[in-house]
């Protein structure tokens, strides 16, 4: 074994021999005369204040040495070592035979040859201080004479009793043991062992408060003698008497607590010496190790040391055993080291003795030892003396070093070895305290001669090792610590070239904190840049991974830290520190990423690495990670974490708080890919969508078509900003000619009611009316969902048309396949199947079980349960392994009442169905299948075996269109709508049906079942069963109890038909733990597998009493299906099985139970077993709709949404309060309602698409709803007209979709986007001719035409729409208002375009026959008053002003032609048409408001007279005076005076002052020369017969035209007349 330089041997005192003294050597402080040392005693005070050494020299004198201890309590620590020589009595009778120091190292007791005891106050003599025994003089020797004759004492022992009595025990050569009380100065008792006593030791047991005396005889025998004890039980157990201080014998119950040998004059039991059984040649010593005292047996024959407990005999096994160096004569034991003295006889040799000048400090160079005995001739070599330092660890047989065989070299066992000078023999060996307790000042702790520096990594002080004091015949030695073992350990590592063997041995030997030392060494290596060596030391230090990484990071070795963390995190995914490691790795990744932003390539690589870590690792804290990433603006990674950890809402909220509203495009793609589009689009009313690019918003919207209606408004806003390709993509989705949008339209078909809104548009005079609120009725404002889709599609087509016209976009070879593929990917996650391929639902009077699918709204595991309520999932029971899905908010070991699974609720995930395994749960939701809990066998299907405490989506089933999920003990089965079966999880029994017995961590399709059209599945503990549409049942998996029903007990790894049921058509199946149940279409119940009553020990015993053959009970008729009797009527709707019981539900909603009933799981009100199904009467009127059976408990859901539980409830699986259980029982024998869940009928239907049938049970209506479609009879719009969604497609959509969109909104959109052609097409479709003309003209204004071309185009358009108006009036009266609007459109555009008025006159003259009356209305209407009447419509005012100005520029002849034509129309048909049109826009005439015009000339002309007469007659009561009398001369004069008036309109002669029934006509009487076409043929005043309002308008027209020249002079009168008549 390697030698470690831990200690050094220092010579503290040199006692010179006489002949050296005679040679004239000088006397120093370290040398004292007196001859060789004969005896020595050493004692450390009980208060550790000082140490005292007494040497008895050959001359009989005493040498005293006092050494203060550092840190002593009496202040001696600052004093130096004191030496004193004490001269002894010269008388031979007073010669000292034996010595002993008291425990306080203050008094010395010497046994003299005359048997007297001399007490020497050594401490007082050295220090002058008082001592404890104040009864004795402190400056002189006190002699205590013996009471009788006795032999000289050979050994003395100072005994301090528990009663503080000082007793000297002296042993003589005759074997006498005398106990002398120092205070009494007399002997108190004595005994004898009848042999020479060579050694005595006190043994004190602090545990039992006993004191023994170990006595060694010269013949090698050893005795053990009890001195005192403190235990009544000890006396009682040994059956001896107890003597009081008075000497009276008392019983144990009356005795004092302490009894000792001093109470007896004659020593009796139990204080008699007892012979100890020790090996021959062995010696017994008392050793202290730590705070424990041992009896040490040193066998010189075997060279071993055995340590025994102080309170046992030596006959048992030792507590410790150590190997020793041969020829060991004395030893002392410390905690870590053993100091052993060895003497070996040497053969005569001429070689000089070993020079120890370097190994033993303090030797005089002039001193040379001589042999003690000399013979004549060559002297005999003295025995060689050694001090061997042994490791307690390596000296033990169980240590790293094996026990040395006899003859083994001592160097292989000793850690360090010192040799004393020849002739110097060791006399005594004493263990001393570490360093400060040494005799003399300690050297500075160092290694290899250098002072050990204080390492900053060393948080604790270096170890201080105890040493020993050796007294030899020549002096005094101190073996003391030389080097710190910690620094020696580090130095060994530095010089070992990474060989740690020696350092490890040192660490084990000294019980060093090796891990911390390796960390210090690693830190030093890191500072020097030796990363590989540092990593080796870090691994050896077993420091935490976090500490290692922190040290690497703090020393700027990030690459090494990352490499190490990656390895650790990959290898340790479930350890206690895996979360912290993952958090640390995340921080390292992020630090490395942020430090290289300038290098784009490296940044991309590191970003991808961090992204992989965040998605693959599930141990880091996701919330903290998201917050950190959000602080650094890494939005992509925040969203990745939120998806991977099911914290989508938290991620969005965090981004909103940090104002990161602009989500990168890459993140948007990932959000869409993992199905998070709905969450982002709906969060905070779409706050994120509004901050995205339009194309990105479109991607989100198209990814979730079910929520398209909520984004229509946003899409309408973003349409102008969408790119052309995005518009085509949106059009492709909204295309009503395809099957993409039709499912959504079909869903809203009741709202898509065709309504003809054109009737409300007939009154629209212009596009200005589109922007007035009055143009919208309440029905038109409330847009339905179907309308919004259609209108959005039309808006897309309209914008595409605009883009093509403006940007010249052309798609001559447009390919839609790419867009179709993208849309298909989005719809694959949302559509269960194509609506066009669904069968029409057939209305049936009776609902049969073959066409119903009952959703599993309640489920039971082994120790937990779940229920679906209002689309939310509630779980309760045992929380271990995260099976409840509540995350980290619930403690790992515990139980909970029903709590909602918040992660699903927060994301708005509707749960349709749920099932529970032993330690996991699976939920079927609207957007996929979620799983959580234990995954030791991969039963979660997430690709690994890591447990999940929150729901995680099973990615492999995302596009599989799953319709039902069932769980076995540790495996799962999923059934898709296309009748495919998928299995995963535990597969050792072949229960996955994949042809092997391997586990599967992801869902795998069972291809063997593809040809069976499976309609239902079930799973047990280790087997599975499926049922096809034609009633064939197949099973696979474990068949230990025959649960497969195949007639044997062999497992099957592929589905096998149950041949015993091949003649039956099975309707329902269910698997228990080790049995299976099938119900046929006729209602027969078959069962096979393990007998339900043999499942539990208590049930088996009860049943065996009636059946003697137990084997028959368990195994008879269980490998093939056998029918069980049932006493109920009605068809079975559902059957479920638990561990040892079954439940079935009939169509009448009655629940039956059978099987074992140890815990009341049948719900029958007792714990009696039930062989056949029996009605659960408590639930008879509850109309049960769903049920589940677990491990000795059951759950059911009734029609009213209330959950019922019963059975075993010790782990909280029933979810009910403790106060609802019976006293001292956790079992419920009758169903109890479970509180804390939603209890409404609507909750059932909303959560899973269920409705309640007339018979009372829930039916899944999601598959049986109407599969009707919306057919618009449209061609393929993507290719119609040669341009994808071009003009032709828009026109046909406007026609075929009419009634499914709001015309007003569409026309508004056309005006906003200035799509006049489309607006015209829309108006043409609705026969809104004035609006259509307006649109055409607006479009014409955008064309680059010359004035001549424009005039020509305008005339063509006007004639076209005028002909349309006239064509509409063939079967009805001509609508003069439409004509007025046409004229307004024409004239205002003519004026705006600055076209010549003459051409306008020509265009109007062509159709003056039909335009005269509306033209008259426009011409005579005062523009000021018209403006006042249409102030709410500024555009119409502008149009009217423009038309008025334009008409004023026309010639007088044209005006007269209009008047003439109007007069003819009025004469022939009456002015009622124009009056009726005016009635719509003007109030009824109020006669009281008429005012006369102020004319001030007595000689007024004819026009003035006529005007005043009109006003005078109008001011009268019109009802009494319906006629107006006008002098004919005045009227004729007025008419003739107007230049340009046609002669045909003048009157030749008429003399009548009154135009009544006999008066002549205003425009001509009946005469032959009258050629006017408007002659009535009657001599009747037409004006007099008109109503007031009709008269006023007609007459005003005539008056204004006839008095055109004078009209301007009477402006005020005209205005007053207009103000009254308008």
Image (cartoon, helix red, strand yellow):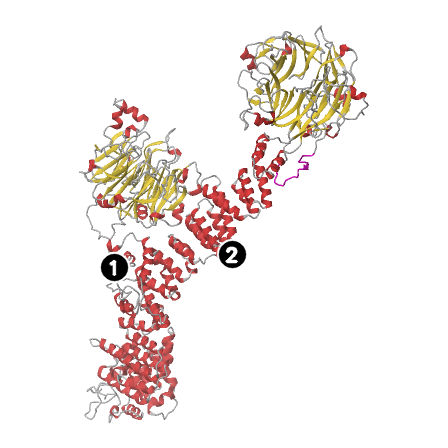
- Residue at screen point 26% across, 26% down: 1113
Looking at the magenta stretch, what is its main secondary structure?
A: loop
- Residue 75 visible: no
Q: Quadrant of residue 768?
A: bottom left
Compared to residue 762, the image places residue 562 above or below, namely: above
In the depicted structure, whether residue 1352 falls above or below residue 1177: below
Can the viewer see residue 966? Answer: yes
> How many discs mark residues in the rendered view?
2
Name the residue tied to disc 2.
Answer: 597
Counting from the top left corner in percent of width and height, residue 1202 is at 32, 41
Q: In the rendered image, which quarter contains the C terminus? A: bottom left
Q: Secondary structure at mark 2?
A: loop
Q: Residue at x 22, y 81 (%)?
A: 1469
- Is 310 on the left or on the right of 1211, as rendered? right
Residue ranking furthest to the right = 24
Q: Which residues are magenta?
A: 444-460
Q: Is residue 906 above or below residue 1549?
A: above
Write down the residue under mark 1: 1270
CA gap between label 1 and label 2 equals 55 Å
Q: How many C-alpha atoms fall within 10 Å of the one at disc 1: few (<14), some, or many (≥20)?
A: some
Q: Quadrant of the N terminus?
A: top right
| Left or right position of 821 against 492 | left
Q: Position of residue 633 (x, y in %)?
A: 49, 55
The part of the image, by quadrant, that contains residue 1159 is: top left
- Image vertical order of residue 160 relative to residue 592, above or below: above
Q: Position of residue 1604 (x, y in %)?
A: 34, 89
Q: Which mark is residue 845?
A: none
């Amino acid at each position: 074994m390697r030698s470690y330089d831990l200690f050094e041997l220092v010579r503290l005192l040199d006692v010179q021999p006489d002949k050296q003294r005679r040679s004239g050597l000088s006397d120093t402080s370290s040398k004292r005369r007196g001859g060789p040392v004969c005896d020595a005693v050493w004692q450390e005070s009980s208060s550790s204040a000082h140490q005292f050494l007494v040497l008895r020299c050959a001359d009989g004198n005493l040498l005293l040495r006092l050494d203060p201890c550092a840190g002593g309590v009496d202040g001696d620590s600052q004093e130096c070592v004191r030496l004193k020589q004490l001269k002894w009595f010269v008388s031979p009778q007073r010669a000292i035979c034996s010595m002993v120091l008291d425990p306080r190292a203050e008094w010395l007791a010497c046994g003299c040859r005359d048997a007297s005891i001399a007490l020497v106050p050594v401490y007082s003599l050295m220090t002058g201080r008082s001592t404890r025994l104040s009864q004795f003089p402190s400056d002189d020797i006190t002699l205590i004479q013996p009471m009788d004759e006795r032999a000289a004492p050979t050994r003395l022992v100072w005994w301090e009793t528990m009663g503080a009595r000082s007793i000297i025990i002296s042993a003589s050569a005759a074997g006498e043991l005398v106990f002398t009380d120092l205070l009494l100065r007399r002997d108190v008792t004595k005994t004898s062992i009848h042999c020479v006593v060579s050694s005595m030791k006190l043994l004190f047991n602090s545990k039992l408060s006993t004191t023994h005396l170990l006595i060694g005889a010269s013949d090698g025998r050893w005795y053990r003698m009890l001195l005192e004890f403190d235990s009544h039980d000890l006396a009682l157990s040994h059956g001896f008497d107890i003597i009081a201080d008075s000497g009276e014998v008392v019983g144990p119950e009356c005795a004092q607590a302490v009894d000792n040998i001093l109470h007896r004059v004659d020593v009796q039991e139990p204080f008699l010496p007892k012979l100890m059984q020790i090996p021959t040649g062995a010696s017994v010593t008392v050793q202290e190790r730590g705070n424990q005292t041992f009896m040490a047996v040193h066998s010189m024959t075997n060279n071993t040391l055995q340590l025994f407990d102080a309170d046992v005999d030596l006959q048992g096994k030792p507590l410790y055993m150590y190997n020793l160096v041969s020829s060991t004569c004395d030893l002392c034991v410390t905690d870590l080291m053993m100091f052993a003295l060895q003497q070996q006889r040497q053969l005569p040799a001429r070689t000089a003795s070993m020079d120890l000048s370097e190994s033993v400090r303090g030797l005089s160079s002039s001193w040379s030892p001589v042999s003690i005995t000399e013979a004549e001739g060559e002297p005999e070599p003295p025995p060689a003396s050694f001090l061997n330092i042994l490791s307690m660890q390596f000296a033990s047989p169980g240590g790293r070093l094996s026990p040395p065989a006899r003859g083994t070299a001592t160097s292989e066992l000793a850690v360090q070895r010192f040799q004393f000078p020849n002739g110097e023999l060791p006399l005594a060996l004493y263990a001393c305290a570490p360093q400060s307790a040494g005799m003399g000042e300690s050297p500075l702790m160092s290694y290899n001669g250098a002072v050990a520096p204080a390492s900053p990594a060393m948080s604790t002080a270096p170890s201080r090792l105890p040493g020993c004091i050796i007294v030899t015949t020549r002096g005094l030695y101190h073996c003391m610590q030389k080097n710190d073992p910690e620094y020696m350990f580090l130095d060994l590592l530095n010089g070992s070239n990474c060989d740690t063997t020696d350092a490890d041995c040192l660490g084990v030997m000294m019980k060093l904190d090796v891990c911390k030392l390796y960390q210090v060494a690693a830190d030093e290596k890191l500072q020097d840049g030796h990363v590989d060596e540092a990593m080796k030391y870090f691994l050896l230090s077993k420091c935490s991974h976090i500490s290692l990484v922190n040290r690497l990071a703090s020393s700027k070795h990030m690459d090494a830290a990352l490499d190490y963390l990656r390895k650790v995190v990959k290898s340790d995914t479930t350890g206690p520190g895996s979360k912290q490691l993952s958090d640390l790795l995340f921080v390292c990744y992020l630090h490395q990423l942020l430090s290289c932003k300038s290098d784009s390539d490296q940044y991309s690589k590191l970003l991808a690495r961090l992204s992989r870590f965040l998605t693959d690792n599930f141990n880091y804290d996701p919330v903290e990670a998201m917050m950190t990433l959000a602080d650094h603006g890494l939005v992509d990674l925040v969203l990745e974490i939120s998806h991977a950890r099911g914290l989508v809402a938290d991620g969005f909220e965090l981004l909103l708080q940090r104002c990161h509203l602009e989500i990168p495009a890459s993140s948007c793609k990932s959000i869409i890919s993992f199905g998070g589009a709905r969450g982002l689009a709906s969060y905070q009313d779409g706050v994120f969508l509004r901050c995205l690019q339009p194309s990105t918003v479109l991607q989100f919207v198209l990814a979730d078509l079910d929520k398209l209606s909520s984004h229509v408004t946003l899409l309408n806003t973003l349409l102008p900003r969408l790119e052309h390709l995005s518009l085509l993509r949106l059009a492709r989705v909204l295309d009503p000619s395809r099957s993409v949008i039709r499912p959504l339209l079909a869903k809203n078909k009741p709202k898509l009611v065709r309504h003809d809104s054109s009737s409300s548009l007939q009154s629209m005079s212009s596009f200005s009316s589109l922007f007035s609120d009055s143009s919208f009725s309440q029905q038109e404002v409330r847009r339905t969902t179907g309308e919004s889709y259609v209108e959005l599609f039309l808006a897309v087509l309209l914008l595409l048309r605009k883009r093509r016209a403006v940007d010249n976009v052309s798609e001559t070879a447009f390919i839609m396949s790419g867009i179709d593929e993208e849309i298909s990917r989005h719809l694959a996650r949302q559509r269960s199947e194509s609506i066009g391929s669904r069968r029409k639902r057939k209305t049936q009077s009776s609902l049969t079980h073959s066409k119903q699918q009952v959703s599993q709204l309640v489920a039971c595991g082994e120790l937990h349960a779940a229920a679906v309520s209002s689309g939310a999932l509630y779980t309760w029971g045992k929380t271990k392994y995260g099976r409840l899905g509540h995350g980290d908010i619930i403690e790992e070991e515990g139980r909970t009442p029903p709590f909602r699974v918040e992660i699903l609720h927060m994301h708005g995930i509707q749960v349709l169905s749920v099932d529970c395994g032993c330690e996991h749960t699976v939920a079927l939701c609207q957007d996929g299948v979620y799983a959580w809990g234990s995954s030791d066998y991969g039963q979660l299907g997430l690709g690994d075996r890591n447990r999940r405490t929150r729901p995680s989506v099973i990615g492999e089933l995302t596009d599989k269109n799953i319709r039902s999920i069932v769980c076995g003990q540790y495996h799962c089965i999923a059934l898709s709508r296309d009748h495919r079966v998928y299995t995963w999880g535990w597969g050792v029994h072949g229960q996955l049906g994949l042809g092997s017995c391997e586990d599967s961590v992801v869902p795998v399709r069972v291809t063997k079942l593809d040809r069976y059209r499976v309609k239902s599945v079930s799973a047990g503990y280790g087997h599975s069963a499926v049922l096809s549409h034609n009633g064939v049942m197949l099973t696979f998996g474990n068949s230990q109890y025959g649960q497969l029903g195949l007639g044997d007990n062999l497992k099957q790894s592929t589905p096998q038909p149950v041949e015993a049921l091949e003649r039956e058509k099975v309707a329902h199946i269910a698997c228990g733990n080790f049995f299976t149940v099938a119900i046929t279409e006729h209602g027969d119940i078959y069962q096979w597998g393990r007998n339900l009553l043999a499942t539990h020990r208590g049930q088996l015993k009860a049943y065996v009493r009636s059946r003697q053959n137990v084997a028959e009970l368990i195994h008879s008729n269980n490998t093939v299906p056998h029918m069980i009797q049932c006493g109920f009527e009605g068809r079975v709707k559902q059957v479920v099985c638990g561990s040892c019981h079954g439940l079935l539900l009939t169509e009448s909603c009655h629940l039956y139970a059978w099987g074992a009933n140890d815990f009341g799981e049948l719900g029958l009100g007792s714990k009696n077993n039930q062989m056949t199904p029996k009605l659960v009467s408590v639930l008879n009127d509850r109309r049960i709709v769903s049920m589940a059976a677990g491990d000795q408990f059951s759950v059911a859901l009734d029609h009213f949404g209330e959950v019922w539980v019963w059975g075993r409830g010790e782990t909280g699986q029933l979810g009910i309060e403790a106060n609802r259980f019976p006293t001292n029982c956790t079992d419920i024998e009758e169903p109890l309602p479970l509180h804390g869940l939603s209890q409404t009928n609507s909750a059932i239907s909303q959560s899973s698409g269920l409705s309640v049938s007339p018979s009372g049970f829930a039916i899944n209506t999601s598959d049986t709803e109407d599969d009707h479609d919306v057919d618009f009879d449209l061609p393929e719009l993507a290719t119609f007209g040669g341009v994808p969604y071009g003009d032709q497609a828009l026109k046909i959509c406007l026609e075929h979709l009419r009634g499914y969109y709001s015309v007003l909104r569409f026309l508004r959109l056309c005006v906003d986007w200035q799509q006049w052609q489309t607006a015209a097409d829309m108006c043409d479709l609705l026969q809104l001719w004035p609006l259509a003309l307006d649109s055409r003209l607006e479009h014409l204004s955008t064309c680059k035409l010359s004035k001549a071309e424009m005039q020509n185009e305008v005339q063509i358009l006007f004639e076209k729409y005028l002909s349309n108006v006239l064509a509409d009036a063939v079967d009805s009266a001509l609508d003069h208002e439409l004509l007025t609007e046409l004229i307004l459109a024409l004239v205002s555009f003519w004026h705006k375009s600055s076209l010549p008025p003459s051409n306008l006159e020509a265009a109007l003259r062509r159709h003056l026959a039909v335009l005269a009356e509306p033209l008259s209305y426009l011409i005579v209407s005062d523009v000021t008053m018209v403006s006042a009447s249409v102030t709410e419509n500024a555009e119409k005012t502008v149009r009217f002003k423009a038309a008025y100005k334009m008409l004023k520029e026309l010639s007088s002849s044209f005006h007269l032609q209009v008047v003439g034509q109007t007069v003819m129309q009025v004469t022939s048909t009456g002015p009622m048409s124009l009056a009726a049109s005016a009635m719509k826009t003007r109030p009824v005439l109020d006669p009281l408001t008429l005012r006369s015009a102020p004319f001030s000339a007595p000689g007024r002309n004819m026009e003035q007279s006529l005007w005043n007469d009109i006003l005078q007659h109008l001011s009268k009561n019109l009802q009494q005076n319906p006629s107006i009398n006008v002098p004919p001369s005045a009227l004729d004069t007025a008419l003739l005076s107007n230049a340009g008036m046609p002669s045909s309109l003048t009157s030749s002669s008429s003399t009548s002052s009154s135009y009544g029934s006999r008066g002549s006509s205003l425009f001509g009487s009946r005469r032959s020369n009258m050629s006017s076409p408007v002659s009535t043929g009657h001599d009747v005043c037409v004006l007099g017969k008109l109503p007031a309002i009709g008269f006023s308008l007609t007459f005003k027209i005539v008056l204004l035209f006839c008095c055109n020249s004078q009209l301007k002079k009477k402006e005020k009168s005209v205005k007053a007349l207009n103000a009254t008549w308008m």
